[in-house]
Amino acid sequence: MAKEIEGLIKSEEDVTAIVLSSYEKTSDPRLNEIMTSLTKHLHAFLLETRPTEEEYEMGLRWVASLGHHTDNANNEVVLAADVLGASTLIDLMNNNGGRGETMSALLGPFYRGGAPDCGVDDNIARSDQEGLPLFFSGRVIDLDGSSIAGASVDVWQASPVGLYENQDAGQDDFNLRGKFTSDAEGRYSFRSVRPSGYPVPTSGPVGDLLRAQNRKAFRPAHVHFIVSAPGRKTLITQVFSDTDEAMIGDVVFGAKEAIVGDFVSHQGPHPDYPGVEGEFFTCKFDFKLVEGTPTFPVPPISGKVED
Ligand code: BEZ
Ligand code: FE
């Protein structure tokens, strides 16, 4: 009969308490709270599902391959958090639109900093591409509807074939990306092409998981925005096209009722834009900002795929 030694592991029931006691000297109370809770939930999950060693190794390989599939043009770690619903949960807990501001949505893995500065009505479609013209406009306002002049409106979207410029060597650098500034009445406006829905990247470990779960990899058509102004909480959001039924079943759970835009179809010729002869779309969307401190996300990517 082995000697009883206090503090040594005797069975699986002892592991959680002994691991938690090793955290006792953590000086940062928030780190301690997070690590304690994470450890309790992780151990409870393992004790509940009782993975085999093969399953455990497969899981660890999956996590490692998230890193191997992350580079300057693709961020598989962000994508994994998105398809697990973690990003939307974090977003809703921190930005629920509760003060009347525009609701936020995921930043996603395709935001690049440094988009070109644009003027009123500039076209962000910099590459030749098929696609119906889109005229997008609105105002940046506060909770009372007063104009916010000089706000930055950073826009990015996928092309009509469903690829962001960073994913597609055929598109020019910064195609379908641009940064606008609201005028004295808070107005912004730009020209683009109607975005289409797209599958999230499926060539990496996230794609393997989606296939194993028989899930659709699709996101509904949308345009991304980061709207910021001095003294205002930065708004990171997406405006969804009301013409896209794939909003229900968004693989990353980003689509929300409050941020569906009215994409109105018109028949050309456009009165102000010679050359716009056939069908074109307009969308008007106002962004309401609350007071707060502007913050800026770290771009998950910094460049394009190589040719
Ligand atoms: C996006 O909207 O760009 C996006 C968001 C989450 C995962 C993949 C793409
Ligand atoms: Fe997107």
Image (spheres, rainbow, N blue to C red):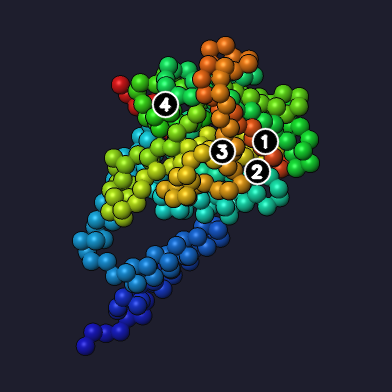
Residue 286's tag is: 1
The answer to the question of whether label 2 and label 3 lie on touching residues, with beta carbons closer than 8 A, is no
Give the residue type that dot 2 points to: Thr
Give the residue type that dot 3 points to: Val
Disc 4 from disc 3: Cα separation? 19 Å
Circle 3 is placed at which residue position?
239
Categorize mark 3 by other alpha carbons within 10 Å: few (<14), some (14-19), many (20+): many
> Which circle, 2 or 3, is nearer the viewer?
3
Precedes in sequence: disc 4 or disc 3: 4
- The residue at the far top in this view is 274
Asked if the residue at label 2 sits under 8 Å from ligand 1, the reply is no
Left or right of 12? Residue 28 is right
The answer to the question of whether label 2 and label 1 lie on touching residues, with beta carbons closer than 8 A, is yes
x, y percentage for residue 89? 52, 54
> Which circle, 4 or 3, is nearer the viewer?
3
Nearest to the observer: residue 282 or residue 238: 282
Nearest to the observer: residue 215 or residue 32: 215
Circle 4 is placed at which residue position?
165
Disc 1 from disc 3: Cα separation? 10 Å
Instruction: Tell me if residue 197 can be seen.
Output: yes
Precedes in sequence: disc 2 or disc 1: 2
Circle 2 is placed at which residue position?
102
If the image is split into quadrants, where does the C terminus sit? top left
Nearest to the observer: residue 57 or residue 79: 79
Disc 1 from disc 4: Cα separation? 26 Å
The answer to the question of whether label 1 and label 3 lie on touching residues, with beta carbons closer than 8 A, is no
